[in-house]
Image (tube, rainbow, N blue to C red):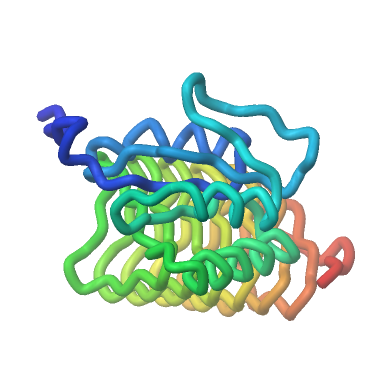
Amino acid sequence: MSVPSITPASALRPLVIWGGSGLAKALREFASALGYEVVAVFDNNPNARPPFAGVPLHHGKEGFAKWKAGFGGPPLAGWVAIGGGNARGRERLALQRYMKEQGVEIVPAVHPTAFVAKDAVLGKGCQVLAQAAVCTEVRLGDGCIIQTAASVDHESAMGDGVNLSPGVRIAGCVEVGSFTQFGVGAVVLPRVKIGSNAVIGAGALVTADVPDNAVMEGSPARIVGQSGE
């Protein structure tokens, strides 16, 4: 397997990440391969600690405003490293909008080992991690996360803020509403429609349509509760 070329540090575009946990680490690992250098991290948790040596962490919008006022560098790119669906997906999109308003360009994050079909459509701020696959004629809304080794097969469509945990398998012609969360290793059979704000549990096998806000578990998956919006 070929190793992706690394852009010289002098040519890297400055990039900021909002969210300082594990997803930030996964994204930073391949930032330089895409031509970016992480120059600052921001987190809404006042107790958050810097995830990277030598990269400052600032707290909340106040911290962002103070840092940006003193930056003075070239135009910034940005990623929002907040995983999850439901409320976390909404938070992710809200932060993308805020960063854009502050002059930060929200750029895609596609790992060099991921496959994204030429005719797939990725919304603003989508993230496709290592060994994931987004196949032909797939449409992803804004702020979707396709985590490690997850796949979305042909002609499927995801709404905004959907999160696929590692190893999720979405078959062809599946429709998923906004802010739905899929647990590790969940599988969805072809032509199934899944509503918004649903939670598909780890290892679930979804064989039939799923209504909005449903919490699904088991194989075959059954409704076991209702998610909060």
Q: Is residue 150 left or right of residue 67?
A: left
Q: Which x, y percent locates residue 122?
A: 35, 69
Quadrant assignment for the N terminus: top left
Query: How many tags in the picture?
Result: 0
Q: Which x, y percent locates residue 61?
A: 67, 57
Quadrant assignment for the C terminus: bottom right
Q: Is residue 126 left or right of residue 13?
A: right
Q: Which x, y percent locates residue 152?
A: 40, 61
- 36 or 142: nearer the eye? 36
- 67 or 225: nearer the eye? 67
> Residue at the location (48% across, 77% down)?
191
Q: Is residue 138 left or right of residue 9?
A: right
- 147 or 54: nearer the eye? 54
Q: Is residue 13 left or right of residue 122?
A: left
> Residue at the location (38% across, 64% down)?
105
Q: Which x, y percent locates residue 202?
A: 67, 46
> Residue at the location (79% across, 63% down)?
215
